[in-house]
Amino acid sequence: MQTLNVELASRTYPIHIGRNLLAQTALILPHLKRKQVAIVSNTTVAPLYLETLSQPLREAGVSIVPIILPDGESYKSTETLNLIYDALLQNRCERSTTLIALGGGVIGDITGYAAATYLRGVPFIQVPTTLLSQVDSSVGGKTGINHPLGKNMIGAFYQPKLVLADITTLTTLPARELTAGLAEIIKYGLIRDADFFSWLENNIGLLLALDAEALSYAIYRSCKNKADVVIADEHEHGERALLNLGHTFGHAIENAMGYGVWLHGEAVAAGTMLAADLSHRLGWLSDKDKQRVANIFKAANLPITAPSLGVERYLDLMGLDKKVVDGKIRLILQQGIGQAIVSSDYDVAQLRQTLALADHE
């Protein structure tokens, strides 16, 4: 097991990464205010891992309230959030009850938001079971739900007490979900870690093959990169926005296609290629580096072309992004491998040319 800490003064918390961690109650018990937890999962993950997590806790005297939600991005909604509140109220859960998110990014985000708002804030723990959630959404305290007009538009910054990333859960992950997670791992290399990007170019096959050593290394390095950014800019006033490389384009794709049709990582990969194209048009990214970006996504079995939505539709949906300031869409763009910036200093005509690519490929 490897451990790193997200150092946020009194809200510092550990991220444990390793095999067979779900049953290790010694990692969880010190973070419980009282011996009652509500475990939020979904209809896919619960049959696989709910008992693995619950039984050792019961044996340690912990009372369990299971809350099983439907599976899918389309359920990251107000209606589903209310199912969590209903269960917490019906079971008389108190402010000292800890919520545990057992699942992927949707479960982590919606459980975190429920924890931030139920009784004005209760503790929660992240137990991510997908690669994407282990390297990204479970770390950093972003929680929330989708709105029909935009992704993650309703939420709160609310840090967990613990992140428990058990790589054994990845063995039951569908291949498409695994590759979606690789998009977020690649992102860290692109925005701030050129050496890691080079390592990924040489080892992407091992990650696809679920090599335990390679996975542990990639997850740890990704979490370290994200933790460093979160520590420097918890509430996304500056550097943390870099973590959204490809996301402004990607969220537009997810919204337009219908939540869940394109997986988040797939949309981020296509969105990152659009960001790379615009960066190239601006003269910031070389032909060679743009090709390296395309090559690694292809090697990871991720899309490198975005769907045809029409330029105006893209611009309309991107205008709903949280990073819009004074009506100007701020984009995360590349100045090389491992070098990204947040910029609204681009020619809109060139952005339109980039978006028009999707209509011709």
Image (cartoon, rainbow, N blue to C red):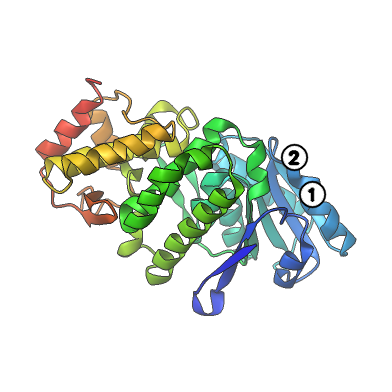
Question: Mark number for residue 52?
Answer: 1
Q: What type is the residue that disc 2 sits on?
A: Leu
* Picture quarter with the C terminus: top left
Q: CA distance from mark 2 to mark 1?
A: 8 Å
Q: What type is the residue that disc 1 sits on?
A: Thr
Instruction: Count how many numbered circles sit on residues in the image.
Output: 2
Q: Is residue 185 left or right of residue 327?
A: right
Q: In x, y percent, where is residue 33?
A: 73, 72
Estimate how packed mark 1 is, as few (under 14), some (14 to 19) or many (20 or more) residues with alpha carbons within 10 Å.
some
Q: Is residue 168 left or right of residue 141?
A: right
Q: Nearer the viewer, residue 359 or 361?
A: 361
Q: In x, y percent, where is residue 76?
A: 55, 41
Question: Mark number for residue 122?
Answer: none
Task: Provide the residue designation for mark 2.
Answer: 48
Residue drawn at (31%, 28%) of the image: 305
Q: In x, y percent, where is residue 156?
A: 48, 59
Dot 2 and dot 1 residues touching (CB under 8 Å): yes
Residue drawn at (70%, 36%) of the image: 43
Estimate how packed mark 2 is, as few (under 14), some (14 to 19) or many (20 or more) residues with alpha carbons within 10 Å.
few
